Image (tube, rainbow, N blue to C red):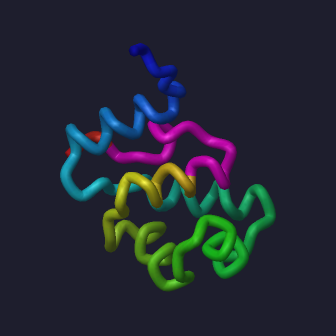
C-alpha cells in the first residue's frame, strides 16, 4: 500500500539519515525570527523548546533533533534545507 509522504517529511528523513548532530544555520534562524517580530522567548514557546536551548541553537553551540528543526522551520515559514547546515 502506498502512503503519501509530504515533501517536508522527505527532507526531514534525508537530513536525519545523512547528518549526525543536525546543526542549524543559527544566524539565519535568528535573522528570520527577528524579521518576523518574534522575541526569543515567544518563538521558543511557539516551537516547543526552552529559550536557552533555542539560544544555543542560534549561536551554533548546539545541534537539534530533526523534529525540533522541523518545528523551527515551520514556525519561520521556511524549508528545512533553508535553516540546516549540510556542510559538515
- Predominant SS along the magenta part: helix
In-image side of 71 versus 53 (left or right): right
Which residue ends up furthest to the top in the rendered image?
2
State which quarter of the image contains the N terminus: top left
Question: Residue 64, how many percent across, how many down?
Answer: 36, 63
Is 42 colored magenta in this rendering?
no
Who is closer to the viewer here, 59 or 8?
8
Q: Residue at x 56, y 82 (%)?
A: 51
Which residue ends up furthest to the front in the rendered image?
1
In-image side of 78 versus 42 (left or right): left
Q: Residue at x 32, y 64 (%)?
A: 63
Question: Residue 35, how many percent across, how many down?
Answer: 75, 57
Q: Residue at x 72, y 76 (%)?
A: 42
Q: Which residues are magenta?
A: 73-85
Q: Residue at x 75, y 68 (%)?
A: 38
In the image, is residue 11 above or below residue 51? above
Question: Residue 20, how many percent across, how many down?
Answer: 19, 52
In the image, is residue 20 above or below residue 58? above
Amino acid at each position: 500500500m502506498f502512503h503519501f509522504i509530504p515533501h517536508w517529511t522527505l527532507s526531514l528523513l534525508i537530513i536525519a539519515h545523512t547528518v549526525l548532530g543536525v546543526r542549524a544555520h543559527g544566524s539565519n534562524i535568528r535573522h528570520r525570527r527577528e524579521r518576523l517580530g518574534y522575541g526569543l522567548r515567544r518563538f521558543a514557546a511557539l516551537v516547543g523548546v526552552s529559550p536557552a536551548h533555542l539560544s544555543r541553537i542560534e549561536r551554533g553551540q548546539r545541534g537539534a533533533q530533526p523534529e525540533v528543526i522541523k518545528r523551527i522551520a515551520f514556525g519561520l515559514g521556511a524549508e528545512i534545507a533553508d535553516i540546516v547546515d549540510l556542510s559538515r
